[in-house]
Image (cartoon, coloured by chain):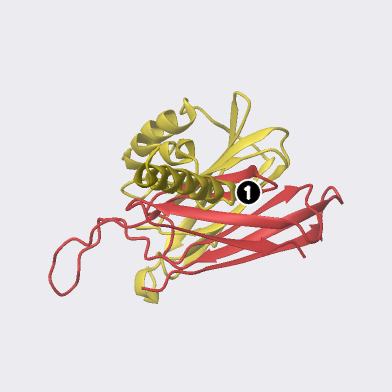
Chain colours: A yellow, B red
């Protein structure tokens, strides 16, 4: 082997080593995670369509075991805090829908092993509407909802 | 634009079950543009730019994966809880947006 070739070979193995280390430390995310974003569910304009795309069904049952916390009146529709809590067993995902938005599905949280039925975030709301939260456990989808009045600019509405 | 993540992981007692759980709270700096908003001066649509996924890992396990649309507020806030972590463990939060930009941060469970 000539010296030049040997150099190339060494360079090559070094690069592989660096990529491997990056994956190991979590700098690079596995591609499978990137591919999972359900575009059709997030772009759907009808609530039922979004739910079918996301959960495989638009059927859900109101349950006292799903709790939603959101303000009665949101003065700023751009920042509406929503908290979801449920003690159900085997929760796979928690989803938040703002029925008045052009694209109603706002967020969905897939829960891994050990994760509890709890998620809190802040959402945008285009207008006064019902916020529906859905908890999927096995083949069941349970829900809770709350109307949030949105007063744009705080002038009352 | 500055992009940063604030992350905090605290052990607390679950009010209902009494179990020790880890509550992770995070705040990410991000514009979260839906792509439907118009620039007030030019009248042109502001291109979509929002976080699609936020993944939390603990001990190389995926504890939670959030899938978001542009409907999540600007500079998004996220809180969730999980069981099993101990004081001193590390949790990592990583996000990816629709432009392929990403960021991550870690926190020690306290």
Give coordinates of residue A136: x percent, y percent. 59, 33
Examine the rendering and report whether any part of residue B99 can be seen.
yes
Q: How many marks?
A: 1
Side of B52 relative to B65 (left or right): left
Side of B76 relative to A111 (left or right): left
Q: Quadrant of residue A66?
A: top right
Side of B80 relative to B48 (left or right): right
Q: Nearer the viewer, residue A135 or A99?
A: A135
Give coordinates of residue A44: x percent, y percent. 33, 38
**Residue reaching furthest to the right:** B18
Image height of B27 relative to A107, above or below? below
On-image quarter of the C terminus of chain A: bottom left
- Residue at position x 34%, y 46% in the image: A103
Q: Nearer the viewer, residue B45 or B2?
A: B2
Give coordinates of residue B36: x percent, y percent. 25, 56
Image height of A81 relative to B14, above or below? below
On-image quarter of the N terminus of chain A: top left
Image height of A61 relative to B84, above or below? above
Examine the rendering and report whether any part of residue A83 can be seen.
no
Q: For numbered disc 1, what is the local secondary structure?
A: strand
**Residue denoted by label 1:** B57
- Residue at position x 18%, y 60% in the image: B45
**Residue reaching furthest to the top:** A139
Q: Chain of mark 1?
A: B
Q: Residues within 10 Å of mark 1 (few under 14, many from 20)?
A: some
Q: Nearer the viewer, residue B66 or A107?
A: B66
Give coordinates of residue B55: x percent, y percent. 55, 49
């Amino acid at each position: 082997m000539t010296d030049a070739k040997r150099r190339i070979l060494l360079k090559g193995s070094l690069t592989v080593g660096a990529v491997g280390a990056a994956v190991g430390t979590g700098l690079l995310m596995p591609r499978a995670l990137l591919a999972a974003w359900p575009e059709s569910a997030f772009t759907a304009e009808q609530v039922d369509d979004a739910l079918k795309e996301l959960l495989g069904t638009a059927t859900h049952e109101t349950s006292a075991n799903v709790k939603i916390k959101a303000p009665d009146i949101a003065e700023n529709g751009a920042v509406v805090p929503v908290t979801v809590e449920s003690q159900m067993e085997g929760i796979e995902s928690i989803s938040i829908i703002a029925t008045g938005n052009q694209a109603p599905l706002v967020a969905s949280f897939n829960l891994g092993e050990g994760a509890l039925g709890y998620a809190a975030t802040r959402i945008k709301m285009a207008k006064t509407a019902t916020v529906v939260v859905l908890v999927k456990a096995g083949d069941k989808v349970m829900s809770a909802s709350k109307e949030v009045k949105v007063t744009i600019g705080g002038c009352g509405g | 634009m500055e992009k940063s993540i604030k992350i905090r992981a605290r052990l607390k007692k679950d009010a209902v079950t009494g179990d020790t759980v880890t509550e992770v709270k995070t705040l990410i700096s991000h514009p979260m543009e839906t792509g439907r908003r118009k620039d007030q001066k030019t009248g042109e649509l502001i291109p979509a730019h929002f976080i699609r996924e936020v993944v939390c890992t603990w001990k190389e396990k995926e504890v939670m994966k959030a899938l978001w649309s542009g409907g999540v507020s600007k500079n998004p806030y996220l809180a969730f809880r999980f069981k099993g972590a101990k004081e001193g463990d590390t949790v990592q939060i990583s996000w990816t947006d629709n432009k392929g930009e990403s960021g991550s941060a870690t926190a020690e469970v306290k």
